[in-house]
Amino acid sequence: MAVRPVGAEIELTAPARSVSRASMVTTLARFVRKKPLGAAGGALMLVILLTAVFADVLQTHDPIATEAAATLARPGDDHWLGTDHLGRDIYSRIVHGARVSLMVGTGSTLLGSVLGGVIGLLSGYAGGKTDLIAQRLLDILQGLPLLVLALVMAASLGPSVPNVIVAISIPIVPRAARVIRASVLSIREMQYIEAAQALGLRHLRIAFRHVLPNTVGPFIVLCTAQLGAAILTEAALSFLGLGVPEPYPSWGRMLSVSAAEYAQKAPHLVLFPGIAISLAVFGANLFGDALRDTLDPRLRGA
Amino acid sequence: MKTYIAQRLGIAVLTLFGMSVVIFILLRLAPGDIVDVLFSAAGYVNPEEKQAILRELGLDKPYWQQYVDWLRQIFSGDLGKSYRYDLPAWQIIKPLVPVTVELAILSTIVSVLLGVPAGIVSAIRQDSTLDYVMRVVSLAGLSMPSFWLGMVIILALVSWLAWIPPLIYVSPRENLWLHAVQFLLPALAVGYRSSALIMRITRSSMLEVLREDYIRTAWAKGQNERAVVWRHALKNAVLPVVTVIGIEFAFLIGGLVVTETVFNLPGVARFLVEAILWRDYPVVQNLVMFIAIVVILSNLAVDLLYGVLDPRVRYAS
């Protein structure tokens, strides 16, 4: 009789509960009722997501087409939110800007959080010297303000959308690693991990198969918390001229210094992109807060 | 206590070294160097000329040698020459530092004055309408890009009060009133943002403390609200708040980068952006090191302050 390795067949994590459609709806309804602010934030994010996806349908003009005759036009019938100093329709640029902001924001958040999460997972699980060294290295990266680091990275790599995503994700890595590591440190002491180790499972397998799934809660909270910061950083980078390049319309670049010169004559130039950024980040923050309150009641009240 | 300080200092020094390496590497990653930027208008660079300039600036040496040279320079007090202005970097940076420091301090004061009382009130009246409103307002503060807030403030002043705020730097010696006004506006813009974070930490920290048993005892003894909050709760709640204030002070510099640009203040942060755009290595390196030093120093100060305020920390290590 062949001896099969015992660890391979024993499921140490609880089997996933079956998620029926009815239970999903009730969970959603409960969330809306208990956390109206969070639901509002989520709705806001959904609107922005849909705007980004359907930008081509929602636009009224070509966002990069300049119209020399109609520069700095006030909001009106033809141009819903007016035109900028080059005659480009602001409404269409804002609609397309949503695409850029979301792409860069979610891209950099996911990249940074996943990378940081894996580092935090391995560092926290390994413990000892590896952990110490990794923590020192991450401290160094975290020592610089987010924007400064992103600035230097963006300048180093050059202007292009993938480079901006990488530039913004780098400062997120140490922050993500710290959060995941903290939760890993407490999970590591749990009995089922001890059982897995006693059964002789390889450490790597334990780390990814058993510890990781239990960090999903803090991970989601981390992602939503960083998403707002990522969108703001992209706006700041574009404002300074180091963000996404032409011809992509970016909310931040619409606010850049050259546009600010015309602000007195045409305040709509400055107001609308800024409102767009604020709404996006506001929605992300509201949703993230509500999510954190639900998933981790101990942190309630912050 | 002495070991605590020594530990913290040692870690700070190590971190500083690590940062210098990271900064050095990050900058060298940049494609193109100062010569390319200088000649970008001409569109073409004679390779021999380029080599000559690189040799003069010391850019043709191997990287590790450049790094050692830089470190040696710093230790001897020389902060290098700016490529762009052909002047010693320190000479260019020196007049900029007080502006940024003043702005950072003012912003921190604003944020504490706004954030801490709001957090306390919010915690005492938890889940009331006031609490909700305050939380939404503070969250809005965290959501707005600080540079946009600055622009909107200027716009509002110009449109509604028909008054143009001084947009060219006015030193306090020239005109104190104008100078104060000029610094107040960006301090408000940046401070509002920081105050949001401080308000949330104050609120959550107060809430935690208010649930403690000793607070319940005070209530049971019949103490009025003022005594309970002021004498007992606040002192214990203030610890995490101090940490956040310290951290925020360092990170303000990130926010100042854009705010200084908007308000046209000649500070270190705005200069950093220009230097980065020009690939002016010495200036950027030293500015970022300066920022890193400020961050580490303020973290150190916070750690030491923690040791003073909370005796448990002192004797734990």
Image (cartoon, rainbow, N blue to C red):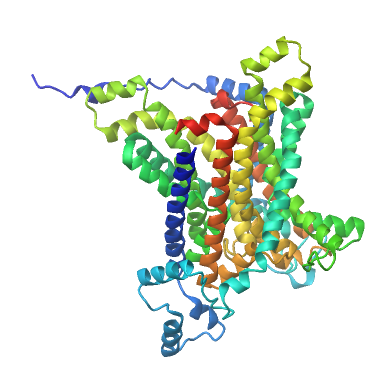
Q: Residue furthest left?
A: A1
Residue A74 located left or right of residue A38: right
Q: Residue furthest front?
A: B2
Residue B120 located left or right of residue B47: right
Residue plotted at (54% across, 23% down): A24
| Residue B237 vs residue B78, the one in the foreground | B78
Residue B263 visible in image? yes
| Residue B225 vs residue A172, the one in the foreground | B225
Residue B31 placement: quadrant: bottom left
Residue B248 in the image, given as x and y percentages of width and height: 62, 46
Residue B98 placement: quadrant: bottom right
Residue plotted at (57% across, 78% down): B84
Image quadrant occupied by the C terminus of chain B: top left
Q: Residue furthest right?
A: B161
Residue A115 placement: quadrant: top left
| Residue A212 vs residue A190, the one in the foreground | A190
Residue A60 visible in image? no
Residue A194 in the image, given as x and y percentages of width and height: 30, 22
Residue B312 in the image, given as x and y percentages of width and height: 52, 29
| Residue A65 vs residue A145, the one in the foreground | A145
Residue plotted at (28% across, 35% down): A204
Image: A161 above or below B249:
below
Residue B245 in the image, given as x and y percentages of width and height: 64, 42
Q: How many marks?
A: 0
Image: A116 above or below A149:
above
Residue B133 located left or right of residue B287: right
